[in-house]
């Protein structure tokens, strides 16, 4: 994130609504913000603080805080929120969050930014960054595992990274696959609902975006050359893929410490199928410190745990653009 994203809000605290975020942030700006902050993390210019994420013992909710500081971009803050599984029945998004941005020069709160839409687009941008840097250039079939709220964001962002000719998808509740089918048809890409084993046999790129606590994809199903973006595991106990898969894949992540503590690699580390020093940050690939994919047959896996710096990066851009375009409210505390 660059210096130009600093927020000049001398008129008071900025309030940037969900609607304002949707009007100023598109997939291209989300991709750039996330790619830039991954690069900054790799260079040591930005770092995340320890994550707090807990089951609150009410409404089956998970709640927590992700925070960090980007020294180069002067972004300091946190995202507060979590996952309420019963919200869909109430007409609400299951993920609920708000991003707080502070002035690193004096500690004053400078912006409150709606986090629901931004969380969805920054999560999709992270998997898209991984596809851009790690998937085979000749990938033609995209596999989607999961059809919840964030899946359509994932699909739209992924389809822009390669010339995909087909989308294959699986979800436990098959009725929800119609949401993915509608996006694919809108974009003119053939769509097919399949079982998981067939999905793995066909797909060159697979995105998992679920809330699973057990492996949905098995090692023996994955064909050589596949790129997998695991985007759903962000809490201790969650799991989307077989831990043995890590032993045959080259594993990348947004942040190693978070990956091994609450990401997909937590299970592989515990099982001894992978060691911490084998995990590579995607920022190292972006910065040219690591080659990324080295062969057409290599299986690559991106463990996208979702770091606080992603939220701060995209929220800083949203706040700046909303202020410039007159879409932010300003108040005095």
Image: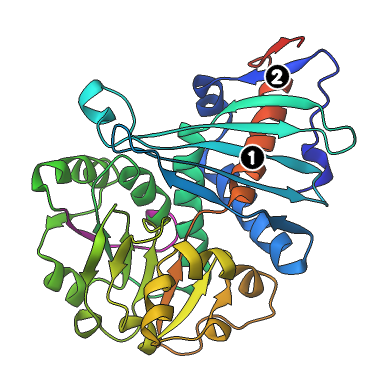
Q: Residues within 10 Å of mark 1 (few under 14, many from 20)?
A: many
Closer to us: mark 2 or mark 1?
1
Quadrant housing the C terminus: top right
Judged left or right of residue 178, residue 306 is: right
Circle 1: element type: strand
Mark 2 closeness class: few <14, some 14–19, many ≥20 residues within 10 Å:
many
The image position of residue 169, as x and y in percent, is: 19, 57
| SS of the residue under disc 2 | strand
Q: Does residue 136 appear anywhere in the picture? A: no
Q: Nearest the camera: 292 or 48?
A: 48
Could you tell me if residue 274 is visible in this image? yes
Earlier in the chain: of badge 2 and badge 1, it is 2
**Residue at the (65%, 31%) spot, across then down:** 100
Numbered label attached to residue 86: none
Q: Write the residue at 49% across / 41% down.
A: 119
The span shown in magenta is 159-171
Q: Is residue 108 above or below residue 134?
A: above
Query: Relative to residue 206, is residue 16 depicted above or below?
Result: above
Specify whether 251 is left or right of 17: left
The reply to whether the magenta stretch includes residue 143 is: no
* Front residue of 202 and 85: 85
What x and y, as percent, mark residue 271?
A: 36, 83
Q: Is residue 88 above or below residue 148?
A: above
Residue beneath disc 1: 78
Q: Is residue 164 left or right of residue 255?
A: left
Which residue is more in the foreground, 62 or 195?
62
Report the side of 61 relative to 103 (left or right): left
The residue at which mark 2 appears reads as 14
* Residue 87 x/y as whole percent: 28, 28
Q: Is residue 161 magenta?
A: yes
Residue nearest the observer in this picture, 225 or 230: 230
């Amino acid at each position: 994130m660059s210096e130009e994203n600093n927020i000049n809000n001398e008129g008071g605290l900025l309030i940037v609504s969900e609607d304002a975020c949707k009007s100023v942030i598109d997939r291209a700006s989300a991709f750039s913000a996330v790619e830039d902050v991954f690069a900054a993390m790799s260079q040591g210019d930005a770092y995340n603080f320890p994550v707090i994420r807990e089951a609150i013992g009410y409404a089956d909710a998970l709640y927590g805080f992700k925070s960090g500081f980007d020294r180069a971009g002067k972004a300091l803050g946190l995202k507060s929120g979590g996952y309420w599984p019963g919200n869909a029945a109430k007409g609400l998004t299951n993920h609920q969050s708000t991003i707080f941005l502070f002035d690193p020069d004096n500690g004053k709160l400078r912006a409150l930014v709606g986090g629901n839409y931004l969380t969805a687009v920054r999560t999709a941008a992270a998997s898209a960054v991984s596809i851009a840097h790690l998937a085979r250039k000749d990938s033609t079939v995209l596999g989607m595992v999961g059809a919840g709220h964030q899946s359509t964001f994932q699909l739209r962002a992924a389809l822009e990274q390669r010339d995909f000719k087909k989308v294959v998808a699986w979800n436990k509740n098959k009725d929800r696959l119609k949401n993915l089918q509608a996006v694919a048809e809108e974009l003119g890409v053939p769509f097919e609902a399949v079982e998981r084993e067939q999905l793995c046999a066909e797909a060159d790129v697979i995105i998992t975006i679920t809330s699973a606590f057990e492996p949905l994809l098995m090692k023996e199903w994955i064909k050589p050359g596949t790129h997998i973006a695991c985007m759903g595991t962000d809490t201790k106990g969650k799991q989307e893929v077989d831990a043995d898969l890590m032993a045959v894949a080259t594993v990348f992540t947004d942040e190693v410490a978070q990956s091994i503590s609450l990401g997909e690699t937590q299970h592989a580390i515990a099982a001894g199928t992978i060691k911490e020093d084998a995990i590579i940050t995607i920022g190292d690939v972006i910065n040219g410190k690591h080659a990324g994919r080295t062969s057409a047959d290599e299986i690559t896996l991106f463990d996208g745990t979702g770091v606080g710096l992603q939220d701060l990066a995209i929220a800083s851009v949203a706040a700046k653009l909303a202020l410039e375009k007159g879409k932010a409210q300003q108040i005095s505390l």
